[in-house]
Image (cartoon, rainbow, N blue to C red):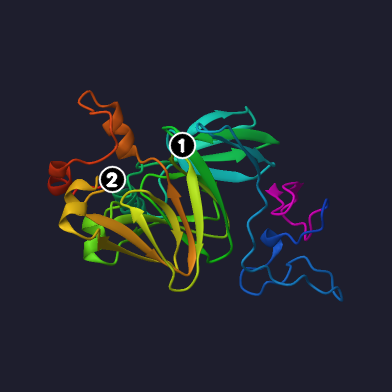
Amino acid sequence: MAFCTNCGAQIEDAARFCPKCGTPNAGALNAGTGINAGAVAGTPAPPPVFNTPAQPLSYDIQGDNLQIIRCHLKPGQELYAEAGKMVYKTASVQWETKMQGASLGDKIWGAVKRKLMGESLFLTYFRATAPGEVGFAGNYPGRVQAFDLRAGQSILVQRDSFICAQTTVQLNIALVKKLGSGFFGGEGFILEKLTGPGIAFIHGGGDFVEFNLAAGEMLQVDTGCIVAFDESVSYDIQFVGGIKTAIFGGEGLFLATLSGPGRVIIQSMTLEKLRRELSVMSSGGDERGPLNALGGIFSSED
């Protein structure tokens, strides 16, 4: 039995249309011609189905600083998630942990890229056999953000921020193009790239602030506080200014600079700041001292 890509209802493999909503059954079309193999003479065949959009996903985001994503799945609907991010699921949702890729080489290369992105080697896939629900959350206090991506639309996000997505969304690695940004930008050389169609969810620390930059408009951000930005946004680093500001300003030697056009999301708390405040040797302040500013220029915030 197959499932309708629109409403999730079960349909016969040879059926041309979903009996519930009338959506064409792509499985009943010839791969080469796009013509229904069981079409009756004189009856016009349905048009070939190309670039089928992702099935709408019903979800809720609940909570404040420890948010949880509640995904309501229809029969046949499927998600994949970072290992360890699931909080609960109903019995009607089946799950399986596996590597991405068709061949062994693809699986190994995919695992290598995932380790570079700060993620686990495996992904967990969730599929509903009947109407069901599954919940996901981040690993530390913060917020989650949903991105409803069009076909071919991409967004770049910080390492280790991915939570879950529809199976139509591609999760890949993105390299910082400029050497200085990789060393001093706070995000390292590795970013994550999410490409639609479909809905994807990420997690960041504290609260989020969103900016929509016009062409040429620049935003200067404390290194490590960047959560996500559109592929059209340019990412670089910039010296903070004078030597006195660099050493005693408490923000380090460099600022990350983002230039429009495009959307930018920043976070109010980084994991590095949380670790620093919770450490036994914490001085109780948020600023970086002079020695830290000089000695930690090659470290990454996250």
In-image side of 124 versus 272 (left or right): right
Residue lying furthest top: 280
* Viewer can see residue 262: yes
Q: Position of residue 60 (x, y in %)?
A: 64, 39
Disc 1 marks a residue whose amino acid type is Gly
* Tag 2 secondary structure: loop
Toward the viewer: 189 or 221?
Answer: 221
Toward the viewer: 56 or 244?
Answer: 244
Q: Which residue is mark 1?
A: 142
Q: Position of residue 170 (x, y in %)?
A: 48, 56
Which quadrant would the C terminus be assigned to in this image? top left
In-image side of 35 versus 182 (left or right): right
Q: Position of residue 167 (x, y in %)?
A: 54, 51
Residue 229 sits inside the magenta stretch: no
Disc 2 marks a residue whose amino acid type is Glu
Q: Is residue 248 above or below residue 261?
A: above
Q: Report the residue at 29% width, 50% height from top.
A: 116
Q: Is residue 153 above or below residue 140?
A: below
Q: Report the residue at 69% width, 41% height from top.
A: 75
Q: Is residue 186 above or below residue 291?
A: below
Q: Which residue is mark 2?
A: 301
Q: Report the residue at 41% width, 32% height from top.
A: 140
Q: What span is in magenta?
A: 1-18
Q: CA distance from mark 1 to mark 2?
A: 16 Å
Toward the viewer: 108 or 275?
Answer: 275
In-image side of 193 versus 277 (left or right): right
